[in-house]
Structure formats: structure tokens, C-alpha cells
Image (cartoon, grey):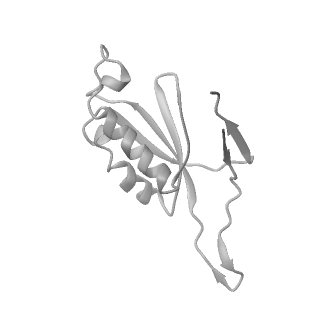
Amino acid sequence: MAACLVLGLSFSARAEEPVAADKLFLVQFTVGEAWVKEKAPHEQAYFAEHSANLKRLRTEGKLLLGGRYSDKGIIIVKAASEEAVRAEIDQDPSVTKGTFTAVVYPFGPFYDGCVERKK
């Protein structure tokens, strides 16, 4: 199954009625002060709620891509503003309770792409 990103986003219903385009943002997750080094990720406090929040964002069509690297995680989301992204991330108890920290960055891709997930 391939997860494709078409990153040249341009949303308009008709030329005479432009619709505000969603912007892209990268959210970087790192371990927070409540992270317990001796526990596996799925055993961390609020990890299930974190997964549920990411699933909600995917279901709503806001989360375009997610992955892990090193001891960090990233997601690419579309939203009207950085404040809107922060409001979505602030619904995640793993962030508000300190299991993870999350930093939001504007994301400006310069290549369209497609990322295939290995099975």
C-alpha cells in the first residue's frame, strides 16, 4: 500500500470564488519529561491516547504522513494555520502530560512525492 503526498496544494472551487488553501506543517515529537527510559514506547503513559489522536487526524484527512527516526517522530499535517495545528496537538494527552513534547514548523516541500510503506 502506498501513501502518496501530492504537495502542490491548490484548492479553489471556481476561479471567481477562491477558497483559502490549507498549509502544510511538520510536527516533531520528542520524548518529554514524563518519558520513562525503562519502558517500551507502547508501555508509556498516554501512548494509547497518542495513537488514538493520530488516528483521528488521519481519519479527518489532516494527517498526510507520519514516521519515526532515531528517538523522534514526525507527522505532516495540513491546516489553515500554525495555531490550528497546535490546537489539534494540544488534544493529545501524551503531549499535555509530558510523555512527548511537540514542536510545530511550517513545511514547504519543493518536490511532490510518494512514500511507500514496507510491509
Residue 66 at x, y percent in the picture: 54, 39
Residue 97 at x, y percent in the picture: 24, 38
Q: Eyeballing the image, is 30 above or below 78?
A: above
**Of 48 and 95, the residue lying toward us:** 48
Q: Which picture quadrant has residue 21? A: bottom right
Residue farthest along the top direction in this orientation: 38
Q: Eyeballing the image, is 73 above or below 21?
A: above
Residue at the image point whose x is 67% and y is 60% from the top? 9
**Of 95 and 42, the residue lying toward us:** 42
Q: How many marks?
A: 0
**Of 60 and 83, the residue lying toward us:** 60
Q: Eyeballing the image, is 26 above or below 36?
A: below
Residue 34 at x, y percent in the picture: 25, 28
Residue at the image point whose x is 42% and y is 50% from the top? 56
Taking 115 as reference, is 32 left or right? left
Taking 112 as reference, is 41 left or right? left
Image quarter in which the C terminus is found:
top right
**Of 89 and 83, the residue lying toward us:** 89
Q: Which picture quadrant has residue 94? A: top left
Residue at the image point whose x is 64% and y is 33% from the top? 117
Image quarter in which the N terminus is found:
top right
